[in-house]
Image (cartoon, rainbow, N blue to C red):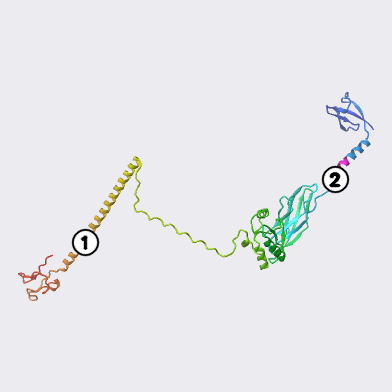
Amino acid sequence: MLVSLTVGKVDAGVTVLLTEDKRLIEFPSILLPPNISSGSIVDIAVSGNAASEKRSSLAFQSLQDRIFSSFGSASPERPVLRCLNATQTSVVLEWDPIQLATADLISLSLYRNGQKAGNIPRPMQMHSTKISGLAVDTEYTFHLVLRTTAGTYTSERVGVRTHKMTDLSGITITTGVLPASAREVLVQAVERIGARMSETVRIDTTHFVTTEGRGIAWEKAVESNIPVVRPEWVEACERQGRILGVTKFYLDAMRTGPVEQAPAPAPAATAPAPQPHAQKPLPTTPEQATDDKSEGEEGEKEGARAEEESESEEDEGEQKAISGAAEQKMRLEERESQKVALRPSPVGDKSPGAYDEAEGSGPGSGSGSRKPSPSPDGASFQEVEL
């Protein structure tokens, strides 16, 4: 088909062409003849190329097929979860390796009783997990949720019931260094209680039984926080018919047995009696001699000062005692003087040789007092010396 167009504006890159019905068409300038200018009329022949169109369609379809076969033919698979082992308080779960196909992993989460328990770390490398701290004889449900760039996939729900205290079937034992006889007895006891034995330390190993703390298996058990017990623990569980605590049966725990008598303590050495006055070593240098001499003089001065103070204190005490005695004596004399009354007595009542009984000078008293002398007015007075 031939189309006539009028050249409008010509630029270096694009030329504007006008159709007969006044429509604008932008056309590459490089495809027009070189002598074209504004107002020129050009004829353009337009025809379809079916062969090229077919070839292009086939190439595009082939590309789509390759993309689909590489990225769209496979999709991620749902996780497959199962219970590996259950005890009285723990559950061990495992699942098949995660198949992502061409999708990218976002997360792998574990759900317990419909609630999210947490994300699985390193889900491409880890294919099992252990849940501890569960209740005894209780039903639980678990499932996995896989999130990818291609969508979300959920596993089937797995129901697990924890064991009773009398159910010993969940015990999984790995043995370490044991004598041959002790190993045989242990194997028989494990079979009787319905437990299991594992050759290596695994995630479902509940107890590590040994008599010596050495070996690669023992180190792995310690790193995995698996209880390391003696064979007596299995025997005690069998006798009691129930699972027992492991505190008394740890490998490093004290065993019960006869108490060993401690050796008598050695007699203590007699300490030397302290010397009341230690002799001071002689000075070795003139400076030390000078220092010792000055120290001695200061000590003598202090001693003399202390003696003077003690003597002054004794003198003060004696003076106080003397003054107290003198004061007491004066008080007694004053009291005696107050008792002596200079009272007159009638002449007819007493004879010249009579004495006043109140004064304690009666006949026979032997006091040696002077006799009363009559006074001019007829009264007599007693002379008393104070």
Q: Secondary structure at mark 2?
A: helix
Residue 288 picture quarter: top left
User: Decide: marks 2, 1 in contact (CB < 8 A)?
Assistant: no
Farthest bottom residue in view: 349
Residue 173 picture quarter: bottom right
Residue 215 located within the stretch drawn in magenta: no
Q: For this view, does 39 lie left or right of residue 134?
A: right
Q: Characterize the magenta stretch by its predominant secondary structure.
A: helix
Residue 346: image x %, image y %? 9, 74
Height in image: 300 above or below 267?
above
Height in image: 6 above or below 264?
above
The residue at which mark 1 appears reads as 325
The residue at which mark 2 appears reads as 69
Farthest top residue in view: 35
The residue shown at (93%, 36%) is 51
**Badge 2: how crowded within 10 Å, few (<14), some, or many (20+)?**
few
Callout 1 amino acid:
Ala
